[in-house]
Image: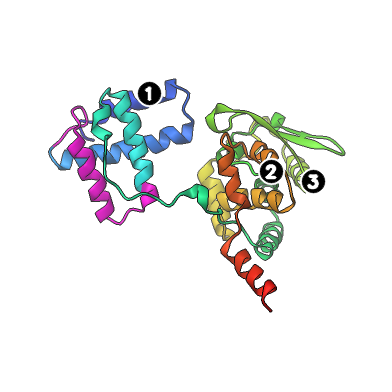
Amino acid sequence: MGKFVVEVQEFLAAQEGLGKAENTVKTYRHIMYAFGRWLDRNGSELSEPTRYDVQAYIKALEKEGKSAATIDKIYACLSVYARFAQRPDIVENIKRTKPQNRRQTAPKSLEELEIKRLKREVEKSGSKRDTAIVYTLFESGVRVSELCALNRQDAVINERSGELIVRCGKGNKSRTIPLSREVRYHLTQYLATRDDAEPSLFTSIRMQRLSSRAVQHLLSKLGTHPQALRHSFARRLVAAGTDISAVAALCGHSDISMTMRYSKASQKELAEAIDKAFI
Protein backbone atom coordinates (compact mmCIF):
# COMPACT_ATOMS: atom_id res chain seq x y z
CA MET A 1 0.00 0.00 0.00
CA GLY A 2 1.29 3.49 -0.80
CA LYS A 3 2.55 6.11 1.60
CA PHE A 4 -0.72 8.02 1.22
CA VAL A 5 -2.66 5.60 3.47
CA VAL A 6 -2.37 7.69 6.64
CA GLU A 7 -3.72 10.81 4.92
CA VAL A 8 -6.66 8.88 3.48
CA GLN A 9 -7.52 7.24 6.80
CA GLU A 10 -7.42 10.56 8.63
CA PHE A 11 -9.66 12.10 5.97
CA LEU A 12 -12.18 9.24 6.16
CA ALA A 13 -12.23 9.32 9.96
CA ALA A 14 -13.00 13.04 9.82
CA GLN A 15 -15.89 12.46 7.41
CA GLU A 16 -17.33 9.74 9.64
CA GLY A 17 -17.05 12.16 12.55
CA LEU A 18 -19.08 14.67 10.58
CA GLY A 19 -21.86 12.11 10.20
CA LYS A 20 -21.38 11.33 6.50
CA ALA A 21 -23.37 8.30 5.34
CA GLU A 22 -21.62 4.92 5.22
CA ASN A 23 -21.99 4.69 1.42
CA THR A 24 -20.53 8.19 1.01
CA VAL A 25 -17.49 7.27 3.10
CA LYS A 26 -17.05 4.07 1.03
CA THR A 27 -17.12 6.13 -2.16
CA TYR A 28 -14.59 8.58 -0.72
CA ARG A 29 -12.33 5.66 0.24
CA HIS A 30 -12.37 4.21 -3.28
CA ILE A 31 -11.72 7.61 -4.90
CA MET A 32 -8.96 8.69 -2.54
CA TYR A 33 -7.05 5.41 -2.74
CA ALA A 34 -7.20 5.55 -6.54
CA PHE A 35 -5.97 9.16 -6.51
CA GLY A 36 -3.21 8.28 -4.03
CA ARG A 37 -1.98 5.41 -6.20
CA TRP A 38 -1.99 7.66 -9.26
CA LEU A 39 0.05 10.29 -7.40
CA ASP A 40 2.56 7.61 -6.35
CA ARG A 41 3.01 6.48 -9.95
CA ASN A 42 3.47 10.06 -11.11
CA GLY A 43 6.02 11.19 -8.55
CA SER A 44 3.77 13.21 -6.26
CA GLU A 45 2.31 12.77 -2.78
CA LEU A 46 -1.13 13.15 -1.24
CA SER A 47 0.46 14.94 1.72
CA GLU A 48 1.60 17.74 -0.62
CA PRO A 49 -0.97 17.92 -3.43
CA THR A 50 -0.88 20.65 -6.05
CA ARG A 51 -3.43 22.11 -8.40
CA TYR A 52 -1.37 20.67 -11.26
CA ASP A 53 -1.83 17.16 -9.77
CA VAL A 54 -5.60 17.51 -9.69
CA GLN A 55 -5.81 18.92 -13.23
CA ALA A 56 -3.49 16.21 -14.60
CA TYR A 57 -5.51 13.50 -12.85
CA ILE A 58 -8.78 14.79 -14.29
CA LYS A 59 -7.23 14.81 -17.79
CA ALA A 60 -5.95 11.25 -17.26
CA LEU A 61 -9.45 10.10 -16.27
CA GLU A 62 -10.94 11.72 -19.38
CA LYS A 63 -8.37 9.94 -21.58
CA GLU A 64 -9.34 6.65 -19.92
CA GLY A 65 -12.89 7.27 -21.12
CA LYS A 66 -14.45 7.94 -17.71
CA SER A 67 -17.89 9.52 -18.02
CA ALA A 68 -18.43 13.17 -17.17
CA ALA A 69 -20.72 12.12 -14.31
CA THR A 70 -18.02 9.84 -12.84
CA ILE A 71 -15.38 12.55 -13.11
CA ASP A 72 -17.74 15.04 -11.49
CA LYS A 73 -18.18 12.66 -8.54
CA ILE A 74 -14.40 12.27 -8.23
CA TYR A 75 -13.86 16.01 -8.43
CA ALA A 76 -16.48 16.56 -5.71
CA CYS A 77 -14.62 14.14 -3.42
CA LEU A 78 -11.27 15.81 -4.13
CA SER A 79 -12.89 19.16 -3.30
CA VAL A 80 -13.97 17.81 0.09
CA TYR A 81 -10.43 16.53 0.67
CA ALA A 82 -8.99 19.92 -0.35
CA ARG A 83 -11.08 21.64 2.33
CA PHE A 84 -10.08 19.00 4.88
CA ALA A 85 -6.38 19.49 4.04
CA GLN A 86 -6.88 23.28 4.15
CA ARG A 87 -5.76 23.50 0.54
CA PRO A 88 -8.83 24.79 -1.34
CA ASP A 89 -6.52 26.24 -4.00
CA ILE A 90 -5.77 22.81 -5.50
CA VAL A 91 -9.29 22.43 -6.91
CA GLU A 92 -9.81 26.00 -8.13
CA ASN A 93 -10.65 26.52 -11.83
CA ILE A 94 -10.06 22.88 -12.76
CA LYS A 95 -11.08 22.26 -16.37
CA ARG A 96 -13.28 19.23 -16.86
CA THR A 97 -16.10 18.00 -19.05
CA LYS A 98 -19.37 18.93 -17.43
CA PRO A 99 -21.87 16.10 -16.94
CA GLN A 100 -25.36 16.36 -18.34
CA ASN A 101 -27.58 18.21 -15.90
CA ARG A 102 -29.43 15.38 -14.15
CA ARG A 103 -32.11 17.79 -13.02
CA GLN A 104 -33.10 18.42 -16.62
CA THR A 105 -33.64 14.78 -17.57
CA ALA A 106 -36.28 12.30 -16.50
CA PRO A 107 -34.60 9.34 -14.73
CA LYS A 108 -34.96 5.95 -16.39
CA SER A 109 -37.91 4.05 -14.99
CA LEU A 110 -39.51 0.73 -15.87
CA GLU A 111 -42.29 0.39 -18.39
CA GLU A 112 -45.56 -1.17 -17.22
CA LEU A 113 -44.81 -4.49 -18.95
CA GLU A 114 -41.36 -4.60 -17.32
CA ILE A 115 -42.91 -4.08 -13.89
CA LYS A 116 -45.41 -6.88 -14.48
CA ARG A 117 -42.63 -9.20 -15.68
CA LEU A 118 -40.49 -8.37 -12.64
CA LYS A 119 -43.29 -9.08 -10.16
CA ARG A 120 -44.22 -12.29 -11.95
CA GLU A 121 -40.63 -13.58 -12.03
CA VAL A 122 -39.82 -12.83 -8.40
CA GLU A 123 -43.05 -14.46 -7.21
CA LYS A 124 -42.35 -17.53 -9.37
CA SER A 125 -38.93 -17.83 -7.69
CA GLY A 126 -40.73 -18.93 -4.52
CA SER A 127 -38.58 -16.69 -2.30
CA LYS A 128 -40.82 -14.73 0.06
CA ARG A 129 -37.85 -12.59 1.10
CA ASP A 130 -36.94 -11.63 -2.48
CA THR A 131 -40.58 -10.93 -3.30
CA ALA A 132 -40.91 -8.68 -0.26
CA ILE A 133 -37.72 -6.84 -1.26
CA VAL A 134 -38.93 -6.15 -4.81
CA TYR A 135 -42.37 -4.95 -3.68
CA THR A 136 -40.89 -2.80 -0.92
CA LEU A 137 -38.42 -1.12 -3.26
CA PHE A 138 -41.01 -0.52 -5.96
CA GLU A 139 -43.95 0.56 -3.81
CA SER A 140 -42.14 2.55 -1.11
CA GLY A 141 -39.33 4.11 -3.17
CA VAL A 142 -36.66 3.57 -0.50
CA ARG A 143 -33.02 3.69 -1.51
CA VAL A 144 -31.20 0.33 -1.39
CA SER A 145 -29.04 1.56 1.52
CA GLU A 146 -32.19 2.56 3.41
CA LEU A 147 -33.77 -0.84 2.72
CA CYS A 148 -30.76 -2.67 4.14
CA ALA A 149 -30.67 -0.46 7.24
CA LEU A 150 -34.28 -1.27 8.16
CA ASN A 151 -35.03 -3.26 11.30
CA ARG A 152 -38.14 -5.33 11.93
CA GLN A 153 -39.52 -2.68 14.26
CA ASP A 154 -39.37 -0.17 11.39
CA ALA A 155 -42.10 -2.04 9.50
CA VAL A 156 -45.34 -1.29 11.32
CA ILE A 157 -48.10 -3.45 9.83
CA ASN A 158 -51.74 -3.41 10.90
CA GLU A 159 -54.78 -5.05 9.35
CA ARG A 160 -55.79 -2.06 7.21
CA SER A 161 -52.70 0.13 7.25
CA GLY A 162 -48.98 0.14 7.71
CA GLU A 163 -45.89 2.30 7.50
CA LEU A 164 -42.18 2.05 7.00
CA ILE A 165 -39.97 4.17 9.25
CA VAL A 166 -36.75 5.14 7.50
CA ARG A 167 -34.44 6.20 10.31
CA CYS A 168 -31.19 6.45 8.34
CA GLY A 169 -32.13 8.38 5.20
CA LYS A 170 -29.78 10.45 3.08
CA GLY A 171 -28.28 13.26 5.14
CA ASN A 172 -29.26 11.34 8.29
CA LYS A 173 -32.87 12.47 7.82
CA SER A 174 -35.76 10.21 8.81
CA ARG A 175 -39.16 9.86 7.16
CA THR A 176 -42.25 7.67 7.41
CA ILE A 177 -43.70 6.04 4.29
CA PRO A 178 -47.25 4.59 4.22
CA LEU A 179 -47.24 1.01 2.98
CA SER A 180 -49.46 -0.22 0.16
CA ARG A 181 -51.66 -3.27 0.62
CA GLU A 182 -49.32 -5.41 -1.53
CA VAL A 183 -46.21 -4.45 0.43
CA ARG A 184 -47.98 -5.17 3.71
CA TYR A 185 -49.05 -8.57 2.39
CA HIS A 186 -45.61 -9.64 1.14
CA LEU A 187 -43.77 -8.34 4.21
CA THR A 188 -46.19 -10.25 6.44
CA GLN A 189 -45.68 -13.42 4.37
CA TYR A 190 -41.90 -13.04 4.61
CA LEU A 191 -41.79 -12.23 8.33
CA ALA A 192 -43.92 -15.31 9.04
CA THR A 193 -40.95 -17.41 7.86
CA ARG A 194 -38.62 -15.83 10.42
CA ASP A 195 -38.13 -17.46 13.83
CA ASP A 196 -34.78 -15.84 14.65
CA ALA A 197 -33.81 -12.98 16.95
CA GLU A 198 -31.92 -10.95 14.32
CA PRO A 199 -33.28 -7.38 14.40
CA SER A 200 -32.63 -6.69 10.69
CA LEU A 201 -35.73 -6.64 8.50
CA PHE A 202 -33.97 -8.35 5.61
CA THR A 203 -31.28 -10.95 6.24
CA SER A 204 -28.88 -13.11 4.27
CA ILE A 205 -28.80 -16.92 4.30
CA ARG A 206 -26.40 -16.65 7.26
CA MET A 207 -29.03 -14.61 9.12
CA GLN A 208 -26.98 -11.43 8.95
CA ARG A 209 -28.12 -8.00 7.79
CA LEU A 210 -28.51 -8.01 4.02
CA SER A 211 -25.97 -5.85 2.16
CA SER A 212 -26.65 -3.38 -0.64
CA ARG A 213 -24.44 -5.45 -2.91
CA ALA A 214 -26.58 -8.55 -2.27
CA VAL A 215 -29.75 -6.65 -3.19
CA GLN A 216 -28.13 -5.30 -6.35
CA HIS A 217 -27.06 -8.84 -7.28
CA LEU A 218 -30.59 -10.14 -6.69
CA LEU A 219 -32.12 -7.48 -8.92
CA SER A 220 -29.48 -7.90 -11.63
CA LYS A 221 -30.57 -11.53 -11.94
CA LEU A 222 -34.09 -10.21 -12.47
CA GLY A 223 -32.86 -7.81 -15.15
CA THR A 224 -33.09 -4.54 -13.23
CA HIS A 225 -31.48 -2.50 -10.44
CA PRO A 226 -32.60 -0.64 -7.27
CA GLN A 227 -32.53 2.83 -8.82
CA ALA A 228 -34.90 1.76 -11.60
CA LEU A 229 -37.45 0.70 -8.98
CA ARG A 230 -37.04 3.93 -7.03
CA HIS A 231 -37.43 5.98 -10.21
CA SER A 232 -40.50 3.95 -11.18
CA PHE A 233 -42.05 4.62 -7.76
CA ALA A 234 -41.65 8.39 -8.11
CA ARG A 235 -42.69 8.39 -11.74
CA ARG A 236 -45.91 6.51 -10.98
CA LEU A 237 -46.80 8.95 -8.19
CA VAL A 238 -46.30 11.92 -10.51
CA ALA A 239 -48.32 10.25 -13.27
CA ALA A 240 -51.15 9.71 -10.77
CA GLY A 241 -51.27 13.47 -10.12
CA THR A 242 -49.61 13.40 -6.69
CA ASP A 243 -48.48 16.82 -5.49
CA ILE A 244 -44.76 17.23 -6.18
CA SER A 245 -44.04 18.22 -2.56
CA ALA A 246 -45.64 14.95 -1.39
CA VAL A 247 -43.50 12.99 -3.86
CA ALA A 248 -40.40 14.77 -2.55
CA ALA A 249 -41.33 13.90 1.04
CA LEU A 250 -41.92 10.23 0.19
CA CYS A 251 -38.64 9.98 -1.74
CA GLY A 252 -36.65 11.79 0.93
CA HIS A 253 -35.50 14.57 -1.40
CA SER A 254 -34.16 17.62 0.42
CA ASP A 255 -34.19 19.59 -2.85
CA ILE A 256 -37.54 19.58 -4.64
CA SER A 257 -35.83 20.32 -7.96
CA MET A 258 -34.57 16.74 -7.86
CA THR A 259 -38.17 15.56 -7.68
CA MET A 260 -39.20 17.83 -10.56
CA ARG A 261 -37.23 15.58 -12.91
CA TYR A 262 -39.98 13.00 -12.63
CA SER A 263 -42.54 15.42 -14.04
CA LYS A 264 -40.59 15.72 -17.29
CA ALA A 265 -41.87 13.68 -20.19
CA SER A 266 -39.67 10.87 -21.49
CA GLN A 267 -38.75 10.62 -25.19
CA LYS A 268 -41.22 7.74 -25.52
CA GLU A 269 -44.01 9.87 -24.05
CA LEU A 270 -43.14 12.76 -26.35
CA ALA A 271 -43.24 10.44 -29.37
CA GLU A 272 -46.61 9.02 -28.26
CA ALA A 273 -47.95 12.58 -27.87
CA ILE A 274 -46.96 13.42 -31.45
CA ASP A 275 -48.47 10.17 -32.80
CA LYS A 276 -51.70 10.84 -30.91
CA ALA A 277 -51.98 14.45 -32.09
CA PHE A 278 -51.06 13.85 -35.74
CA ILE A 279 -52.74 10.66 -36.89
Q: Nearer the viewer, mark 2 or mark 1?
A: 2
Residue 219 sits above or below residue 40 on the image: below
Q: Nearer the viewer, mark 2 or mark 3?
A: 2
- The structure residue drawn at horizontal position 73% and vertical position 44%, both measured from the top left corner, is 190
Residue 80 sits above or below residue 260 on the image: above
| Mark 2: amino acid | Ser
Query: Per the image, is 253 magenta?
Result: no
First in sequence: mark 3 vs mark 1: 1
The colour style of the image is rainbow
Residue 275 screen position, x and y as percent: 65, 74
Per the image, the residue denoted by label 3 is: 185
Per the image, the residue denoted by label 2 is: 140
Magenta segment, which residues? 44-70
Q: Are marks 2 and 1 in contact (CB under 8 Å)?
A: no
Per the image, the residue denoted by label 1 is: 13
Q: Quadrant of the N terminus?
A: top left
